Image (cartoon, grey):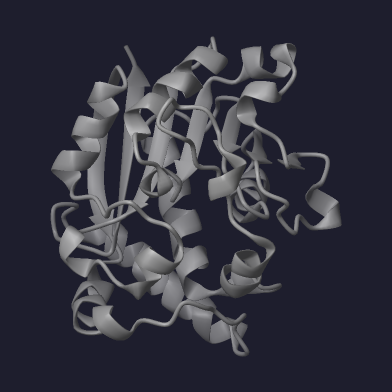
């Protein structure tokens, strides 16, 4: 994740620490059902918004879980991460740790037509300012995709521990992108079946994750959540939300 201060500039003081990466992104976490399902939901949204064929940059990409998945799907995606993320060696040519998106080479920034911010803007006190900064840094930008933790009533110890400023509903998510000069294309919730458990457990949610010991079981659960997202109306509340938008 790559947060920003109130001016829209990235701020190292609010990036993930090494300890937080160990808690949230241990080796093998890419096989966790949540990542399996979210990767598929993101890829589906990119195709729906006609972004799959664009040169893509994931801002705040962490260790590169989304970047790696999208590249395996045949998409031209690179990533940058302000924090010292534990990027696997095989991704170091396309995932740039300790790198602000605005500091990428001008020719590289000038080629990017789609930006992804996957669970990033909830860490920002003024997300619209950050998104405007993204637009300024990427002159060829046409489309943006954003995912966020959803529903304010699900606020939990997880949000406090990882420095979230808010959880979004679809209205506040659309309004944030509109304030940044973007035109929302579609927005919807996903992880619908997790809504009730998350509400009931919000006061005692754990703040660390473990890599799955039964990856096949997580693959099955991830597939189930992927199909749920495709089948249920997007307005049905879920624990996450996704939106795509066009640059005006």
Residue 153 image point, x, y percent: 16, 65
Is 108 displayed left or right of 213 in the figure? right
Q: Where 136 falls versus 28 (above or below)?
A: above
Image point 55% across, 25% down: which residue?
54
Rendered location of residue 208, percent (x, y):
52, 78
Q: Nearer the viewer, residue 226 or 120?
A: 120
- Residue 1 in sight: no
Q: Residue furthest right?
A: 89
Total number of numbered discs in the rendering? 0
Q: Position of residue 138 (x, y in %)?
A: 55, 16
Q: Which residue is rendered at x = 71% and y = 23% of the image?
A: 104
Q: Quarter of the image holding residue 23?
A: bottom right
Q: Nearer the viewer, residue 196 or 120?
A: 120
Instruction: Report if residue 115 is visible in the image.
Output: yes
Q: Nearer the viewer, residue 119 or 230?
A: 119
Quarter of the image with the C terminus is top left
């Amino acid at each position: 994740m790559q947060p920003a201060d109130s001016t829209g500039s990235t701020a190292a003081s609010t990036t993930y620490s090494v300890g937080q990466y160990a808690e949230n992104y241990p080796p093998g976490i890419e096989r966790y059902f949540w990542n399996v399902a979210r990767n598929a939901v993101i890829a589906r949204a990119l195709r729906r918004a006609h972004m799959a064929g664009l040169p893509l940059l994931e801002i705040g990409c962490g260790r590169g879980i989304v970047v790696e998945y999208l590249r395996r799907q045949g998409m031209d995606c690179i990533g940058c991460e302000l924090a010292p993320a534990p990027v696997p060696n095989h991704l170091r040519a396309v995932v740039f740790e300790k790198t602000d998106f605005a500091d990428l080479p001008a020719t590289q920034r000038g080629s990017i037509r789609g930006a992804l911010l996957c669970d990033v803007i909830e860490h920002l006190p003024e997300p619209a300012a950050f998104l405007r900064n993204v637009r300024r840094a990427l002159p060829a930008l046409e489309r943006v995709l954003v995912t966020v933790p959803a529903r304010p009533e699900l606020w939990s110890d997880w949000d406090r521990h990882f420095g979230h400023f808010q959880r979004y509903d679809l209205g506040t998510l659309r309004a944030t992108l509109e304030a940044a000069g973007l035109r929302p294309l579609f927005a919807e919730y996903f992880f619908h079946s997790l809504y009730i458990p998350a509400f009931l457990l919000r006061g005692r949610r754990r703040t660390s994750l473990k890599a799955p010991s039964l990856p096949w079981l997580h693959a099955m659960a991830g597939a189930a959540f992927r199909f749920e997202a495709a089948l249920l109306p997007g307005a049905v509340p879920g624990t996450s939300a996704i939106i795509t938008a066009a640059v005006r």
